[in-house]
C-alpha cells in the first residue's frame, strides 16, 4: 500500500527527527573512538546485543588511538566492532564509515583464501600473516596482520593489529634491485679485473723484453749511458760507465759526482738541476775521471721520456768522449791564431802600399782608380776577418783583455749611427738613445759590439730598410738594442746564434762572413759583466740587445 502523501510540516518534522538521529549516532561514534564509552549495543536478527570490554578504560582507549598500527576488533561474523583512527587512515576512509562493516571487504581477492584460513586459525591460537588490504583510491596496502582473541562481556571477540609494511616492502624491493645491480657490477668488475690482470701480465712481459733490449743496446754502445728518475736519482749505468770509471757495480745513485772534475762539478750540477726543474734537454761538457786517474772531456746529453699526459717518467742520458775533438779544436785554434798573426803583417804592409798609391790617385787612369778603391775595400774586409780570428784565438786562450774606463754610451750610439748612415745610404737609421748614459767599459770594444749588431741588422734586412737603435736606463742597468724588420730567427736559430762559426742561412738569402761576430760580441759583453740576447720571430724581424751595469 502506497504511503500517504505527507504535508510540508510533516516532512519538516521527519527531517528534524532524522537529523537528530544522525547527530546522536555521530556523537556516539566519537564517544566510542575517544574512549568515553566502554560498551555498545548492536542490533541483530535476534534482538539487541550488548558488547563491553572487561577491562576497558579511557587510558587503554587513548593508547589504542595513538598507536602507529591499525587496531580492529571483530565479532564472530567478521564485523568491525571497533577501529582506531590509524586503521581508517590505512584504508583512506573516514572512521565513522569503517565501524560496522565486514572486515572481509577490505581484503584483496587474491588474499581472501589466505585471510579466511588465518581468521579461522586465529580463533584457536595467536597467529600472524602478511596480507594486502584494499585502500580506497590508493591501491593495495601491504600489512602484517597479528590476530589474538579478546574476551568481552557478551563473548569472545577477535583483536587484529595491522602493521603497515608498505615502506618496508618498497625498501626490500629497492634493496633487492640494488643487490641485483651490485651483483652485476661485481660481475663486471671481476671480468674487468681479469682483463686487467691479463693486460698487466702482457705489459709486464713486454716491459721486461723492452728493458732487456734497452740494456743490450746500452751495454753495446761506445758511449756511457744512464737513466735517472724525475727527482734526479740515477737508477742505471751501462757497462761502459763501470769500465771507464772503475767503480763498483753496486755504486749507482749519483756516483757520477765522484768522478766529475772539481772545476766542472758546479756547472754540471747547475745544468742538471735546471733540466730537472724545467724539463728541458740536459746538455753540458765536463771532464770525467778514468779508472787510471786521468780526466777526459765528455759531452753529456739527457732527454726526458714522457707519458701521454706529458708527465716525465724518467730521463735517458749519454756521455760521449770528446777529448780527441777538444784537442783537435785546440790545434785548430792554435793554427788560426798563428795564421791570423802571420797574415796581419803582410796585410798591414799591403794596406800601406795601397794608401801610398792612393796619394797619387788623381794622376791615375779612371780604370786604375776604380780597381784601387775595390782593392782597399776588399783589404779592409779581409783585415776585419783576420782581426775577428785573432779575437777568437784570444778568447780561447783567455787573453781577451783591455783597459776599462767610463764610457758615454749616448755619444757612442750617436757616433755609430752617423757612421753607418754614410756606409749604408740606402737604409734609414733612427737613434732613440737617452741622454747621459754612462758605463764602465772599453769604448773600442763596445763600439765593435754595436757596429756588429748594426751590420747584422743591415745584412738580414734586404727589403724593409728601417733600423731603430735605442739606449735607455732600466733600474741599475743600461740596455742598448738594435731592432730590424728583416728575416727574423726561428726558435732553433735563437739557441745557436751566439755559437762560434754559426751563421744564419736562408734559402732566399745567403750571407757572407765566418759567423764569429756575435760570438766575439758575447765574450766582450761578458767581460763587461753584462748580458747579451735577442728577441725574434721568424719573418718578423729581430731585436738584438746588450745590458751593462750603469754607473
Image (spheres, rainbow, N blue to C red):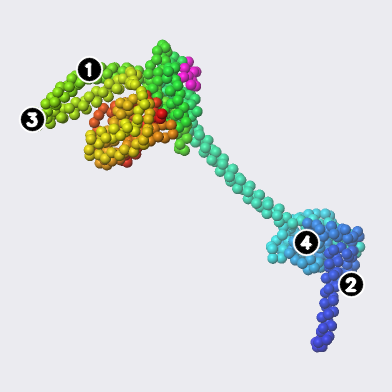
Residue at 83% x, 70% y: name it. 26
According to the picture, the residue beneath numbered tag 4 turns out to be 87
Q: Position of residue 359 (x, y in %)?
A: 13, 26
Helix, strand, or loop for circle 4?
Answer: helix
SS under mark 3:
loop
Q: Bin the neighbour count of mark 3 within 10 Å (Cα to Cα): few under 14, some 14-19, many 20 and up.
A: few
* For residue 206, side relative to residue 510 (left or right): right
Please identify the quadrant where the C terminus is shown.
top left
Q: Position of residue 506 (x, y in %)?
A: 27, 36
Give the answer, above or below, for where 320 lies relative to 84: above
Image quadrant holding the N terminus, namely bottom right
Residue stretch rendered in magenta on the structure:
248-258
**Labelled pair 4, 2 in contact (Cβ < 8 Å):** no
* Mark 2, secondary structure of its residue: strand
**Magenta stretch contains residue 250:** yes
Marks 3 and 4 sit apart, C-alpha to C-alpha, by 137 Å
Q: Nearer the viewer, mark 3 or mark 4?
A: 3
Q: Which residue is mark 2?
A: 47
Of the residues under marks 2 and 1, which one precedes in the sequence? Answer: 2
Q: Indicate which label's residue lies in the foreground, 3 or 2.
A: 3
Q: CA distance from mark 1 to mark 4?
A: 124 Å
Q: Residues within 10 Å of mark 4 (few under 14, many from 20)?
A: many
Mark 3 and mark 1 lie on one chain; the one further toward the N terminus is: 1
Q: Which residue is mark 1?
A: 342
Relative to 20, residue 399 above or below: above
**Residue 496 is a magenta residue:** no
Nearest to N terminus: mark 3 or mark 4: 4
Taking the image as shown, residue 495 lies to the left or right of residue 195, namely left
Which badge, 4 or 2, comes first in the chain's sequence? Answer: 2
Query: Which residue is identified by label 3?
Result: 365
Amino acid at each position: 500500500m502506497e504511503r500517504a502523501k505527507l504535508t510540508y510540516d510533516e516532512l519538516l518534522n521527519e527531517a528534524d527527527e532524522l537529523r537528530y538521529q544522525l547527530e546522536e549516532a555521530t556523537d556516539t561514534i566519537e564517544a566510542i573512538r575517544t574512549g568515553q564509552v566502554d560498551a555498545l549495543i548492536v542490533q541483530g536478527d535476534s534482538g539487541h546485543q550488548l558488547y563491553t570490554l572487561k577491562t576497558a578504560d579511557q587510558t587503554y582507549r587513548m593508547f589504542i588511538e595513538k598507536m602507529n598500527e591499525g587496531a580492529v576488533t571483530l565479532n564472530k561474523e567478521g564485523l568491525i566492532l571497533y577501529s582506531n583512527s590509524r586503521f581508517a587512515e590505512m584504508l583512506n576512509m573516514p572512521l565513522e564509515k569503517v565501524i560496522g562493516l565486514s572486515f572481509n571487504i577490505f581484503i584483496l581477492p587474491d588474499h581472501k583464501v589466505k585471510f579466511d584460513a588465518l581468521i579461522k586459525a586465529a580463533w584457536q591460537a595467536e597467529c600472524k600473516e602478511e596480507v594486502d588490504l584494499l585502500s580506497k583510491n590508493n591501491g593495495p596496502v601491504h600489512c602484517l596482520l597479528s590476530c589474538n582473541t579478546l574476551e568481552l562481556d557478551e563473548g569472545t571477540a577477535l583483536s587484529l593489529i595491522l602493521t603497515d609494511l608498505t615502506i618496508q616492502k618498497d625498501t626490500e624491493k629497492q634493496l633487492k634491485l640494488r643487490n641485483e645491480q651490485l651483483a652485476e657490477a661485481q660481475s663486471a668488475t671481476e671480468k674487468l679485473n681479469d682483463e686487467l690482470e691479463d693486460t698487466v701480465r702482457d705489459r709486464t712481459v713486454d716491459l721486461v723484453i723492452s728493458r732487456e733490449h734497452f740494456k743490450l743496446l746500452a751495454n753495446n754502445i761506445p758511449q756511457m749511458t744512464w737513466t735517472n728518475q724525475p727527482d734526479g736519482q740515477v737508477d742505471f749505468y751501462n757497462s761502459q760507465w763501470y769500465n771507464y770509471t772503475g767503480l763498483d757495480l753496486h755504486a749507482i745513485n749519483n756516483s757520477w759526482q765522484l768522478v766529475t772534475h772539481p772545476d766542472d762539478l758546479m756547472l754540471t750540477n747547475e745544468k742538471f738541476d735546471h733540466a730537472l726543474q724545467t724539463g728541458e734537454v740536459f746538455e753540458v761538457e765536463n771532464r770525467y775521471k778514468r779508472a787510471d786517474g786521468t780526466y777526459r772531456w765528455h759531452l753529456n746529453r739527457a732527454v726526458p721520456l714522457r707519458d701521454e699526459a706529458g708527465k716525465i717518467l724518467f730521463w735517458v742520458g749519454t756521455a760521449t768522449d770528446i777529448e780527441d775533438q777538444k784537442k783537435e779544436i785546440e790545434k785548430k785554434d792554435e793554427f788560426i791564431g798563428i795564421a791570423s798573426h802571420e797574415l796581419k803583417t803582410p796585410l798591414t804592409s799591403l794596406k800601406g802600399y795601397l794608401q801610398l798609391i792612393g796619394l797619387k790617385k788623381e794622376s791615375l787612369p779612371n780604370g786604375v782608380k776604380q780597381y784601387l778603391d775595390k782593392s782597399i775595400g776588399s783589404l779592409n774586409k779581409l783585415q776585419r776577418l783576420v782581426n775577428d780570428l785573432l779575437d777568437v784565438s784570444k778568447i780561447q786562450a783567455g787573453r781577451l783583455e783591455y783597459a776599462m774606463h767610463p764610457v758615454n754610451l749616448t755619444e757612442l750610439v750617436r757616433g755609430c749611427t752617423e757612421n753607418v748612415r754614410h756606409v749604408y745610404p740606402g737604409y734609414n737609421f733612427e737613434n732613440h738613445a737617452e741622454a747621459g748614459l754612462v758605463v764602465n767599459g772599453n769604448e773600442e770594444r763596445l763600439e765593435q759590439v754595436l757596429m756588429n749588431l748594426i751590420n747584422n741588422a743591415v745584412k738580414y734586412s734586404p727589403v724593409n730598410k728601417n733600423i731603430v737603435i735605442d739606449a735607455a736606463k732600466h733600474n741599475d742597468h743600461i740596455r742598448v738594442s738594435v731592432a730590424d724588420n728583416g728575416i727574423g730567427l726561428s726558435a732553433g736559430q735563437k739557441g745557436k746564434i751566439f755559437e762560434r762559426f754559426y751563421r744564419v742561412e736562408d734559402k732566399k738569402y745567403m750571407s757572407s762572413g765566418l759567423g764569429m761576430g756575435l760570438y766575439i760580441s758575447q765574450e766582450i759583453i761578458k767581460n763587461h759583466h753584462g748580458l747579451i740576447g735577442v728577441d725574434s720571430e721568424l719573418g718578423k724581424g729581430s731585436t738584438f740587445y746588450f745590458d751593462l751595469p750603469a754607473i
